[in-house]
Amino acid sequence: VIQVADWIGTFVFAISGAALGVERRLDLFGVLVLACVTALFGGITRDVLIGAVPPAAFASWQGIAVASVAGVVTFYARPLLDRVRQPVLLVDALGLSLFAVTGTDKALAHGIMLPLAPILGMISGIAGGMLRDVLVVRLPIVLHTDIYAVAALAGGAIVALGVWLHVPSAAAMSAGALMCVSLRLLAIYRHWSLPGAWEDET
Amino acid sequence: VIQVADWIGTFVFAISGAALGVERRLDLFGVLVLACVTALFGGITRDVLIGAVPPAAFASWQGIAVASVAGVVTFYARPLLDRVRQPVLLVDALGLSLFAVTGTDKALAHGIMLPLAPILGMISGIAGGMLRDVLVVRLPIVLHTDIYAVAALAGGAIVALGVWLHVPSAAAMSAGALMCVSLRLLAIYRHWSLPGAWEDET
Amino acid sequence: VIQVADWIGTFVFAISGAALGVERRLDLFGVLVLACVTALFGGITRDVLIGAVPPAAFASWQGIAVASVAGVVTFYARPLLDRVRQPVLLVDALGLSLFAVTGTDKALAHGIMLPLAPILGMISGIAGGMLRDVLVVRLPIVLHTDIYAVAALAGGAIVALGVWLHVPSAAAMSAGALMCVSLRLLAIYRHWSLPGAWEDET
């Protein structure tokens, strides 16, 4: 189940990268790079930081293959994408929650201490999108809009809390994913966001 | 002593990141990310390069905590900051010299050869500020203004020289830190800078 | 032979970074950073990903020395450079093919599976130029112009194929380098490029 969910998350993250690449008029290779970077760089960063090398993305070919397929589809079928933007946003929330929860779990398994593991889960979920934005020379959206990273952090915190309380791993991970996806969807529909620095000026 | 100095350096570096985040009107999370990145990314880069994983920033919670506190303080008390800009610049020089010297020392302890260790010390001191600038989409200031990285390099070189001459470690590190902080303060007060490429055109 | 070729590739890549730094009016240190980053970051990334730490660039001083010399020469002798732009483009193709082929070979030696090794070869060849572009705040050129990364990928694929077919390593690497350099030169002279996203609009 987790494996399939991971592929879905990878696919959806890759679409968001590829769509931005198409918007910025990159060539096919550039679009594929953005697709792979967005989908895989978060996990790669986490794995390098916890010492799990080669990172999962270079230990099996499936991640790169799934991200590349998403990139090619996006490159050749963008008009289609505009019609499914809303569903993509929902599946993206699912992908985020999955990356946050499994990232936290993997960090714990590699000996990262409890209070820091959710940060590595969050990095798994957001670093790909940050590098995507840096590559197309724009301020990473995760730094200034919306509740996104905080949802990932909260999901990871539930997983760490579960381990601390000796809750069975599957239960803690389900609860963490539910927490993350709920926060994220509430943020989307209620336009929640964090306090912004610009409010100082009003 | 070194531990306390390290926290002070982390705190001041984090303020410089957070202040830039406030200036660019990021939200609270974005400001915290910039604070942590600026304070911790240099050491993380060094640790990944020398094979010390998980990096120190993920092996204990203090670094992230100190940087986050600095971020929150900066976010909610920016007007205060404007009044202490000059002292911050001085403490920043202290932070830089500390990171350069301890970074060189740690690189040597992990088997990096003598002439290259100061480069890893310098990376400890400047990589955080470089990523901070890349994230807000501006040319890293360390690449075009002032004597900053060179001061870090000189401080690290003193440490490496000391090891080569079998000087006691504490003495070499003090001398290195003194060298770095002096160079940096002289650069600030005398407006020293490196030759710039634009001078070709005059 | 490979060692000398590697230094030539490093030198030429460093020139491309330093020349951009001069163009953007960085100071001497900034130009040296761009020279080193462009020449060495690809190999550093590959080494971190395959677990070969410290990376080759920090295990011996030659790489940094060669790149720094190239940086200083470029800084003080830019007018000269304009006259040799065409040869530089040719030697750059050589450098790319070498990095792609040796990068793939090293990835295989560290246990990366056959279909993924060429990707690490490609990363060796292009990541330096990508970071160079990110640091000067421009869209990485490899993402939107020309056949460059694909040539590296093709060269690496030949090496992987050779290993799979038990062809002697030297033969496979020569064939891979030849493939990469030919593709790259053909792309330069025939103005080949990949399909671009902008063609959707015509």
Image: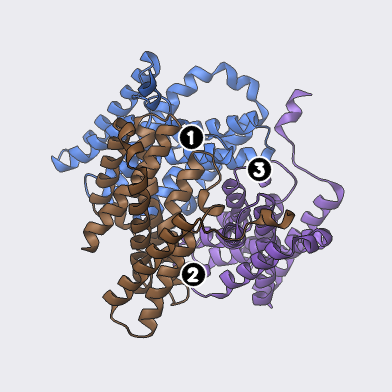
Chain colours: A purple, B blue, C brown
Q: Residue furthest right?
A: A190
Mark 2: amino acid: Phe
Name the one closer to the observer, B60 or A18.
Answer: A18
**Residue tagged by mark 2?**
A58
Marks 2 and 3 in Cβ contact (< 8 Å): no
Label 2's element? helix
Q: Give the Cα separation between the discs numbered 1 and 2.
A: 31 Å
Point 39% across, 46% down: residue: C37
SS under mark 1: loop
Host chain of mark 1 = B
Asked if disc 1 and disc 2 are in contact, CB closer than 8 Å, the reply is no
Q: List the single residue furthest toward the front.
A: C190
Q: Are marks 2 and 3 on the same chain?
A: yes
In front: mark 2 or mark 3? 2
**Residue nearest the observer in this picture, C21 or A14:** C21
Q: Residues within 10 Å of mark 3 (few under 14, many from 20)?
A: many
Indicate left or right for B93 with C66 as reference. right
The residue under label 1 is which amino acid type? Pro
Residue wearing tag 1: B140
Residue A55 visible in the displayed image? yes
In the image, is residue C114 above or below residue B148? below
Query: Residue type at mark 3?
Result: Leu
The foreground one among C119 and A38 is C119
Q: Is residue A153 visible?
A: no
Near mark 2 (Cα within 10 A), the count class, few <14, some 14-19 or many ≥20, is many
**Callout 3 secondary element:** helix
User: Whole-percent x and y of residue A192?
Assistant: 81, 45
| Residue topped by disc 3 | A143
